Amino acid sequence: MISKVIQYNSTPTVVSDYQAQNAHLQAMINKANGSMGVLKQTSLSTIPTIAQGGYISMGGTLYVVDTSDYTILGSLSAGLNYIALAVSGDNLTATWIQDISAYSWNAVYNYYTNGTNALLPYVIKYDTNYYISIFNQSFNQVLKTDSSPTFSRITQTNKYTSGDYRITEICGELESSITIIEQKLIEYKVEDSGTVKANYSAKLSVANTFPVNYVSLKINGVEEVKDFLVAETYVEISHSISVSKGDLVQIFAFTTTSNSVIVDGFYLSCDEYGINDDYWGVI
């Protein structure tokens, strides 16, 4: 039952007036905790009820759901359903309705009304299950309609957090260069800012002590450091660099001999710098 909370005289004259005041004060405290006409639902497949202990104000009079959870009258239809309140003596009744075109906002009482009935600020969408939402003063609703939503597209980029572990290992190889120009082997886009360490291995396909074969670490085409290669076994290379969001970390290679420059296992790490930010990179 939704029962009227006894109203006090505007100027209290008897003990019952003060008791009524206390009851209203307690209601305000309970409302501050969120129990204001609260709907209760044990699962998505069960019809919501109005929870026992909830308070509802209508026409300046306060009511409380006092004896048990209130079963809303009537039935729901497929689609959107609303809850209409009506005064019946010292009680309220609540009934499911679907058409609210006659209702408008009443700024004095802070609810929608058609002049006789008022609406609880809930909308329930019924489609196999019962989904509860709260509407605003424009009747806009954001409703959950599927307990297992699907998405048409999720874009995932290579990501690492603080810690020296590999998110992506990129390999590249430069064959003999006839035109004697550098060639870009690897490019990695950074989507955050900070100091990181670029790690990779490089070697020649044929050992050559003449110092003309090299790999160059660049940011946005600007060289940071150059490492010459002479061996046909991998050399581990690691350089600290400062990057900004959107920077392109690049590996270029150069050779003029009948040789190949091979770069393997490129990755970025940030553990020793104590960086807490997440980094994202896109090849």
Image (spheres, rainbow, N blue to C red):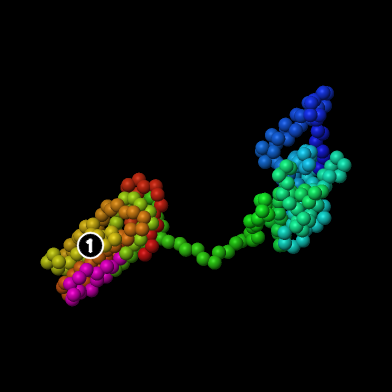
The residue nearer to you, when weighing 98 against 53, is 98
Tell me which amino acid carries mark 1. Answer: Ser
Residue lying furthest right in this view? 89
- The residue at 71%/51% (across/down) is 122
Q: Nearer the viewer, residue 228 or 89?
A: 89
Q: Which x, y percent locates residue 244?
A: 34, 54
Q: Quadrant of residue 208?
A: bottom left
Figure disc tally: 1
Q: What is the x, y in percent for residue 214? A: 19, 64
Which quarter shows the C terminus? bottom left
Measured from the top left, where is residue 55 in percent x and y?
A: 75, 40
Q: Residue at x 51, y 66 (%)?
A: 153
- Residue bearing the label numbered 1: 216
Q: What range of the chain is rendered magenta?
A: 173-186
The location of residue 184, given as percent across then percent down, is 27, 68
In the displayed structure, does residue 96 sit left or right of residue 268? right
Residue 186 in view of the camera = yes
The one nearer the camera, 199 or 54, is: 54
Verify whether residue 182 appears in magenta.
yes
Callout 1 crowding tier (Cα within 10 Å): few <14, some 14–19, many ≥20: many
On screen, 23 above or below 168?
Answer: above
Q: Quadrant of residue 143?
A: bottom right
